[in-house]
Amino acid sequence: MHQRTLGLWTRDPEPEILPTCAALGIGFVPFSPLGKGFLTGTVDASTSYPAGDMRTGMPRFTTRNRAANRVLVDQIATLAHARHATPGQVALAWLLAQHPSIVPIPGTRRTARIDENAAATQLPLSADELADLGELAQRVGVQGNRYNEDQMSLVDK
């Protein structure tokens, strides 16, 4: 798979990959920067997915883990509300502020989400807000692996 995600939900590229990219002048395109929709604030423990949806087999999307991971999203949503933005916009704005060579490409099935996601580029977060979000993500953490055990064995961690 060799997918590298980055965002408030997955920060594993930060220690090695991002400094290397910066040193070499290479951009970084995070995979699934909104956590397969979780960081948009539209997913909670009661969310159901249709048969065949990839999230049904992902540990982070079990009912228990969705409830636990909602703590992070609720805090993002609080900031989003104060800034007249969406949780997804705040999550993307945080990511964009980490380094100018980071270019997230959030997936979407809806045209309206393209405009919403693009508006994250116009959402300046203060240094305190950026630091608070980063610290929150570290402190709260995320429950569940990104993928099931077989899929995780294919991911270049």
Image (cartoon, rainbow, N blue to C red):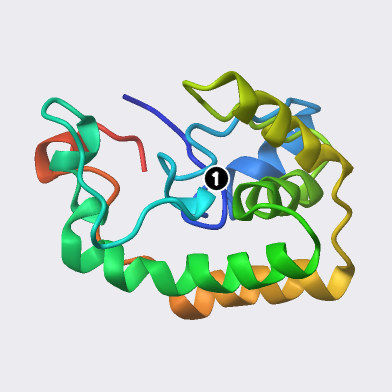
Q: Give x and y (percent) for residue 40.
A: 52, 49
**Vertical placement of residue 104 versus 8, above or below:** above
Q: Position of residue 129 (x, y in %)?
A: 79, 71
**Is residue 72 shown above or below 90?**
below
Residue at left offset 50%, top offset 65%:
73
Q: Which residue is mark 1?
A: 6
Residue at 74% x, 54% y is 85
Q: Residues within 10 Å of mark 1 (few under 14, many from 20)?
A: many
- The amino acid type, in three-letter code, at marker 1 is Leu
Residue 131 quadrant: bottom right
Residue 101 rendering spot, x and y as whole percentages: 78, 33
Residue lying at 50% horizontally and 25% vertically, measured from the top left: 108
The quadrant in which residue 94 appears is: bottom right
**Left or right of 101 on screen, residue 113:** left
Question: On the rendered structure, is 145 left or right of 139?
Answer: left
- Residue 12 picture location, percent across and down: 48, 52
Q: In the image, what residue occupies the spot 37% across and 66% down? A: 142
- Mark 1 lies on a secondary structure that is loop
Q: Is residue 121 above or below residue 139?
A: above
Viewer-side residue, 11 vs 60? 60
The residue lying toward the viewer, choosing from 72 and 40, is 40
Q: How many marks?
A: 1
Q: Quadrant of the N terminus?
A: top left
- Compared across the picture, whether 132 is left or right of 51 comes to right
When the figure is inspected, residue 111 is found, relative to residue 8, above or below; the finding is: above
